[in-house]
């Protein structure tokens, strides 16, 4: 009897992740980032070292299953509804990566009404502005630009509490507010937190996990208190299995889940299977016809969707 109880506990223990994942703060924030690899490594070590113990084998198998469920469940489509075609907006977001101008033709070929571009600099800003005269760009700190076929009004500039812009897009079918953000990566450096929106050292900006969570909460609060339609877009560096993503989706719908989700970061980070680039809309708006597209010289996939008031 005692052995059976031990085996049962071993099988259930990995699933405690779903109970504690929001309660342990930065500990589970870090675990969420590396969860697929953590689950595999833990299962293999336990399964190999204690393979003669049934409880250990059950724990190893259960850990693998939990990792699969935790990774893939946030990708399950749950469409927000059908967009009113007369008021639709085609919007795209991309982290352009190291080869800034290499991706220019890709972005222009999308023919999006609104573009949000992370890691942008003067060369790409100049190139895109030829097709999008309505634009704003910030080349320091968050390094982000917004390009629109319609007039823009800047409501908030980038600063210590906002790694991006809040702009009002004056679309012919109705105004909406866009929070375009490039949130610093929630990773430590050898010197601790390096996020400083006033500096420009040519490297990706990083922050402590706690600082990243604070910035995400600021974005969520902005969206929640805005009485207009709101869109949040950009490289948020928030994995969809972490509490930061859930803080956002408490107030917003994930526009990219009109179809199956997928990892947005590739290259050397592909093993983490993280979806950190997002397009979110406030309730009352829907999404259709979304897609992920490759970007030359970038370790991110871009995202594009048709969004707008629900039909």
Image: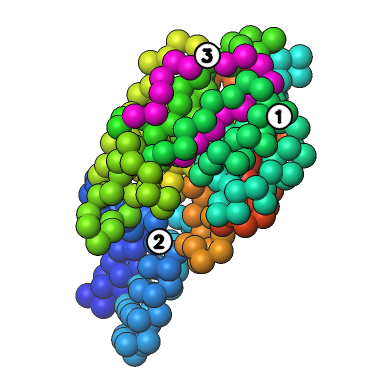
| Whole-percent x, y for residue 46 in the image | 33, 80
- Membership of 147 in magenta stretch: yes
The first of marks 3 and 2 along the sequence is 2
In front here: 270 or 110?
110
Q: Which residue is mark 3?
A: 153
Badge 2: how crowded within 10 Å, few (<14), some, or many (20+)?
Answer: many
Residue shown at 37% from the left, 87% from the top: 48
SS assignment at label 2: helix
Disc 1: CA contacts within 10 A as few (<14), some (14-19) or many (>=20): few
Residue at 28% over, 36% down: 214
Q: Secondary structure at mark 3?
A: strand
Where's residue 104, x and y in %? 69, 43
Q: Nearer the viewer, residue 12 or 286?
A: 286
Between marks 1 and 3, how big is the CA–CA gap? 19 Å
Q: Which residue shows up at 39% across the image and 75% down it?
A: 41
State the residue at coordinates (66%, 22%): 133
Q: Say whether marks 3 and 2 touch (CB < 8 Å).
A: no
Q: Nearer the viewer, residue 192 or 90?
A: 192
Provide the residue span drawn in magenta. Answer: 142-159
Residue annotated with mark 2: 35
């Amino acid at each position: 009897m005692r052995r059976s109880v031990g085996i049962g506990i071993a099988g259930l223990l990995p699933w405690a992740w779903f109970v504690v994942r929001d309660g342990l703060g930065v500990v589970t924030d870090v675990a969420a980032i590396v969860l697929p690899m953590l689950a595999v490594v833990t299962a293999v070590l336990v399964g190999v070292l204690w393979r003669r113990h049934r409880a250990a084998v059950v724990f190893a198998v259960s850990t693998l299953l939990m990792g699969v469920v935790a990774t893939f469940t946030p990708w399950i489509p749950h469409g927000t509804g059908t967009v009113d075609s007369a008021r639709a907006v085609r919007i795209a977001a991309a982290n352009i990566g190291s080869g800034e101008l290499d991706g220019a033709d890709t972005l222009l070929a999308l023919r999006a009404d609104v573009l949000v571009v992370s890691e942008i600099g003067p060369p790409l800003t100049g190139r895109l502005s030829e097709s999008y005269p309505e634009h704003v760009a910030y080349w320091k700190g968050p390094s982000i630009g917004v390009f629109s076929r319609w007039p823009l009004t800047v409501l908030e500039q980038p600063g210590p509490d906002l790694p991006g812009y809040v702009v009002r897009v004056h679309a012919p079918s109705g105004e909406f507010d866009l929070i375009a953000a490039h949130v610093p990566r929630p990773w430590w450096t050898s010197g601790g937190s390096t996020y400083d929106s006033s500096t420009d050292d040519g490297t990706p900006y990083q922050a402590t996990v706690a600082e990243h969570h604070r910035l995400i909460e600021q974005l969520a609060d902005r969206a929640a208190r805005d009485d207009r339609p709101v869109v949040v877009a950009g490289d948020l560096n928030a994995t969809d299995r972490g509490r930061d993503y859930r803080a956002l989706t408490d107030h917003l719908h994930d526009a990219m889940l009109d179809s199956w989700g997928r990892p947005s970061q590739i290259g050397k980070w592909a093993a983490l299977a993280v979806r950190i680039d997002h397009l979110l809309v406030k309730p009352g708006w829907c999404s259709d016809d979304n897609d992920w597209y490759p970007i030359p010289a970038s370790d991110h996939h871009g995202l594009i969707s048709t969004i707008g008031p629900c039909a």
